[in-house]
Amino acid sequence: MSSIQPVRGTHDLIGEEQRRHTLVVETARRIAGVYGFDEWSTPIFEETRVFSRSLGDTSDVVSKEMYSFNDRDGESLTLRPEGTAAICRALVSNALTQALPQKVFYTGPMFRHERPQKGRYRQFHQIGAELLGAAEPLADAEVIAMGYAVLSALGVAEHVTLELNTLGDAESRDAWRAALVAYFSDYRDRLSEDSLVRLEKNPLRILDSKNEGDRALVADAPRMAEFLTPQAQDFWDELRAKLDVFGIRYKVSPGIVRGLDYYNHTTFEFVTTRLGAQGTVLAGGRYDGLVKQMGGPDVPAIGWAAGVERLAMLLETPPQAPRSVVIVPVGTPDEQALCGILQALRGQGVRTEIGYKGALRKRMERAAKQNASHVLFVGEDELARGLFRVKDMESGQECEVSHQALMMDAGSVFA
Ligand code: ATP
Ligand code: MG
């Protein structure tokens, strides 16, 4: 039998890869806390309709990327392809629309049936933030500032650019959509097959097309900016003024329409040139209509999601593997005393392991191989004297420490 491999587009996270991943998630969680966000966890699968209607039937995600299946009761379920729709569902299910605003941070695996390539997987992970119940541009600016703070804390901010756009309000969007339909209708013969369908069903989607021929047409398509209502224009102006106050630099990019249908007003992406074609690391926007679609009241909202794998790849200095103190028994010391020391060190929060088998030399070799910070020698003699030899594996120097010091202040012995 050939060896069993993980499913195409999925990965095991081991060693440095897991450490990078953990650093990204923990950093984001910490920054989210600083900005006053609470963490929520929602199930990994939902009723299919949570995603199908909200993301838009013609979005790539819904039309070709969802992992949907009928469970044993015949109910259609879907492995979540993204977090926002599920968070809005949770807001409504838990009657939290009575307790607004809610500031939510989440993290976890997402599933999309995409063509696997660098930075694009079938199971990947996101961190995300949603601010539910705030309609003013200050909320948008805060949420963007928080995303930027995460990138800064990870040390990748200097490699990303914030691209910002507005999709306006419903009225602006209707006018724009009409102009787009008129424009693209003149080029029916040059549009991709997918985009011909989009032209009928959801013309804005053409702007997000990855097809090269489409992209050439998109470059000269009517711009949203020409169709903004005075209110939408005010919102847009105020958002940019607030970003200036927060010291966040951006580039206005009319092409940022996002892959999902639920956005209005603000859309943005933090992009990098360092990851090849998969350059978007953090993206989001305002989605004032989504909670209502989930059966709740009108709740204005703004949020973003970021790809953990892409951020993990961007980290310049990978987090170091943790180093242990390794206890190496000399001869055959009393086991109870040995375990007592092991327990005492661990009780003080010192990462401690014990070298088991083999001659002293073998144990030392193993300690070096597992990148021990220190070796603590424990033999009958040491136990009797209450004095132990410690070898600093970095410098190679040895010194003696007392039993008392190990019991009371192991942290500074092995600092
Ligand atoms: P793209 O245009 O790259 O397909 P998207 O618009 O589908 O991205 P979102 O749904 O906004 O992406 O997801 C937010 C972030 O999640 C992306 O910016 C990216 O960093 C990450 N992401 C999305 N899909 C994948 C995937 N298949 N594999 C790894 N990361 C992903
Ligand atoms: Mg996509």
Image (cartoon, rainbow, N blue to C red):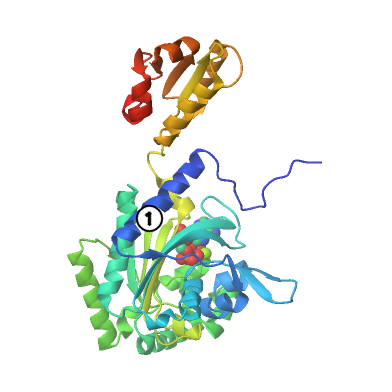
Q: Is residue 197 above or below residue 369?
A: below
- Which quadrant holds residue 254? bottom left
**In the rendered view, does 196 fall on the left or right side of 19?**
right
Q: Closer to the camera, 165 or 405? A: 405
Could you tell me how many numbered marks the image carries?
1
Q: Is residue 400 above or below residue 49?
A: above
Q: Residue at x 35, y 23 (%)?
A: 404
Q: Is residue 346 above or below residue 50?
A: above
Q: Position of residue 260 (x, y in %)?
A: 49, 73
Q: Closer to the camera, 301 or 270? A: 301
- Which quadrant holds residue 97? bottom left
Q: Amino acid at mark 1?
A: Ala
Quarter of the image with the C terminus is top left
**In the rendered view, does 202 fall on the left or right side of 252?**
right
Quarter of the image with the N terminus is top right
Residue 368 shows in this picture: no
- Please rate how many residues cluster around mark 1, counting C-alpha atoms within 10 Å: few if below 14, some from 14 to 19, many from 20: many
Q: Position of residue 292 (x, y in %)?
A: 46, 85
Q: Position of residue 91 (x, y in %)?
A: 45, 77
Residue at label 1?
A: 28
